[in-house]
Image (spheres, rainbow, N blue to C red):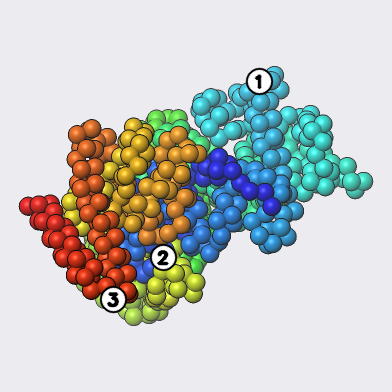
Amino acid sequence: MARLSQELIDQVRQSVDIADVISQDVQLQRQGKNLVGHCPFHEDNTPSFSVSEQKQFFYCFSCHRSGSVFDFLMELHHLSFPQAVEQVAKLGSVTLPSDFQANDEARQSQAPDSQQSQLIKLHQTAMRLYHHILMNTPAGEPARRYLKKRGLTQELIDQFNLGYAPKEEVLKVVLEKEGHDYQLLRRSGLFTENRDGSLHDRFFDRVMFPLKDGQGRPVAFSGRLLQKSADSPKYLNSPETPIFNKRRLIFNFDLAKKAARENGKLLLFEGYMDVISAYGAGVLNGIASMGTSLTDEQLSMIVKTTNQLDICYDGDAPGQNAIERALKLIEASPVANQLRLRVVQLPTGQDPDEYIQQNGGARFREYLKNTEETPTAFRLRYLRQGLNLSNQAELLSYLNAAIGVIAKVSDPVARDVYIQQLAKEFQLSPQNLQQQLAVQVKKQPPVAVPNPTPPGEQWSDDSAVISGRRPFNGSQGQRYGRYNRKKHQATAQPAPQAVVLTASEQQSLALDQTERAERLLLVAVLHDYGVRAQLKAMPDFDFIHDQYRHLYQLALNYFTEHDEYELASFLDYVDDPALKATLTQLDGLDAQAALSPEAIDDCLRIIMQKTPLTQKIAQVKLSLQEAKARSNQELITQLTVELIELYGQKQRLKTEETS
C-alpha cells in the first residue's frame, strides 16, 4: 500500500472547507469570526462547538475536542487516519495514488469509487466544452443573446459555468477522441443509446445548466430549449446515474450553504434562472429543487445548514398554488418541527428575474427583507383565491376556513392577533370569532413535540435548532470517558455569544508565571523562525511542563517538512487529544506571537531559572532512593538536607513569581 507524503496530505486537507464537511453533521451558525453549533461529541444544551474557517480547525469549549477535518471525521465516524484522508480526498476531488487503500473495505469498493471519479471528470469535460461553445463560437451566439436578454452578465455566466449544447453532435466526438471506455460513456447519462448500442449526445440546441453536488462538482445537466418545440420538453435533465440522484441534489447548494451560515436562512426559488438572477443581485443564499417538489433528502440537507427556509415563488395563481404545495410537503416531512418557514410572494405576474430587471438588485433585497410572512398569514390570503367576499355565503365560507387555519397555530397570542385582524377587516365581533376559534382548537389533535419549544405556529414556525448530534460509541467512551448515549433533542436556544478565548480564560489555564512564560514562548516558536533557531542553539534549554515539552519536540519535527506554521496541519502531527486541546487553546494567544526580543529573554529567564532547579531536585530524589536501597545512612542524611534546601529555593522562587 502506498504511503502518502505529507505534501499530499496537506493538499487533501486544503481541498475542502472544514465548515462544509462538519456542516453535513452539525448545523453551524456565524458568531463573530467563527461558526458555532452544538457539539456532536457530548450532550450540549448550549452551543460550545466552534469552527474556524480561517484556520481550518474545530474546538469544543466544553469537552475540549479539537483538531483538523481529519480529526473530526475520525472521531465522529470512527475512521482511521488513512480512511479520513481518503474520504476528504473524495470530497475535494483529489486523486490519491492508485495503490493507496485505506483498508480492505476500500479495496473492495475501489472499482465503484474509480467509476465515480471518472464520471465526474466526464462531466467536468462536458461542462468546459459547453461553456467554450457558448462563449467563443458562432454556434453559441443565439444562446448568448438569450442569456443577455435575461440580464445575465459575463461574470454570472462564468460563475455558474453556463454553456450551450449545439445542434451538431460534438460531445461524443470529443470524449471518444480522449479514449474513454464505452461502458463508462453509457453510464454517464450524457448520451442516449439506440437499439444497436450506438451512443448519441443527449442534449441538442439547449442552454446548459450544470447541476453540482454539495462540493461544487458537476454531476448532471439541465438543458433549456432556445426554441419551443411540441416534441421536446422545455427543460431536459440528465437521467439518474451513479453520481446523480435528483432527490439528493439542490441547485446552487454548494454556494448557498456558505451564505446561509452568514444570514441564517436559505431562499427557495422556483427555477434555476431565478437563483442565478438573485445571485447577481447579491442574494447568495438562493436554491432551487430538481422539479416542483422538495424531497425528504433535500430537506434533510437544508436543516443541517440552517433552521429557516423562505419560499419565494411567483405572485400569480400558479405561484401561490406552488407555495401551498411546498408548505404542505414540508409540514408532512420528518423535519417539519426543525425548520422555521417563511413566505415571500412576489407581485402578481413577476418572477424574481423580472423583478430584478425592472427594479434592480437593491430593491429586490429590500423586498425579500420586508415582505416575509408566516405560513399562516400566507394561507389566510391564499384562501381568498377565487372568492367574492362581497357575497355573504362566500364570506362565511372563507371565515370558517380561516378560523380553521388559525386554530392550528400553537401560540395563543399569535392566534389572538390573527383573530383581531379578521375582526377589524370585516367589522366583526372579536368575541364571536374567539368563540368559534375555541371550538376549532378543541378539535385539533395534540401536537407531538420532542422538547418544549418557544411559542410559535404549528406550521414549522418555531425556532427549533438542529444540532446533528450523534451518540458516542463504546470505543470513544473508553477513550474519552463516559457520555450519555441518549440522543439529544435540541430546543431553541438564545443566540450564543461569539466563542473566543478571553484574557481571563487564557490566564486561568496557566498555573503560574512559569507556565505563562512557557505558553507565550511556545506560541512564539510556532510563529517565529528566529525564536526556533535561538532555542535550537541552546542545548541546555527545555520546557518544564510535559505538554509544552512534547509540543515543542513535535514542532521541531513539523518544521523539517513545512516552511510556515498552519494550525490545521500541525494538529495532524499530534495524536494525544489532550495535546490537541492545549495546542488549540494556545491559538488564542497568537495575537501575542510577535514577542519582542526582551519578552523572549524574560520567558527564557523564568523557564531556565526554574528548569535546572527542577532537574536537580529529580536527580537528588533519585540518589536518595538509591542510598535508601543500600542503607547508607550517612548519605541519606546528606541528601535529605540537600533536598530540603532545594525545596526551599523552589518555594522562594514561587513566592517571587506570585509577588
Amino acid at pointer 1: Asn
Query: Can residue 357 be seen?
Result: yes
Number of on-image labels: 3
Residue 165, how many percent across, how many down? 71, 32
Front residue of 47 and 10? 10
Residue 143, how many percent across, how many down? 64, 27
On screen, residue 168 versus residue 559, left or right, reads: right
User: How far is disc 2 from disc 1 in space, using C-alphas?
Assistant: 52 Å
Of the two numbered discs 2 and 3 on the same chain, state the one appearing first in sequence. 2
Q: Residue at x 55, y 43 (%)?
A: 6
Amino acid at pointer 3: Ser
Question: Can you say whether 12 is above or below 363 in the image?
Answer: below
User: How far is disc 2 from disc 3 in space, using C-alphas?
Assistant: 54 Å
Q: Residue at x 31, y 45 (%)?
A: 541
Callout 2–callout 3 Cβ contact below 8 Å: no
On screen, residue 86 versus residue 380, left or right, reads: right
User: How far is disc 3 from disc 1 in space, using C-alphas?
Assistant: 95 Å
Of the two numbered discs 3 and 1 on the same chain, state the one appearing first in sequence. 1
Question: Can you say whether 233 is above or below 83 in the image?
Answer: above
Where, by quadrant of the figure, is residue 416 drawn? Answer: bottom left
Amino acid at pointer 2: Phe
Of the two numbered discs 2 and 1 on the same chain, state the one appearing first in sequence. 2
| SS type, badge 3 | loop
Question: Can you say whether 351 is above or below 243 in the image?
Answer: above
Q: Residue at x 9, y 52 (%)?
A: 656
| SS type, badge 2 | loop
Residue 129, how many percent across, how many down? 69, 30
Q: Between tags 2 and 3, which lies in front? A: 3
Front residue of 138 and 417? 138
Q: Between tags 2 and 1, which lies in front? A: 2
> In the drawing, what numbered circle is on residue 631?
3
Residue bearing mark 2: 41
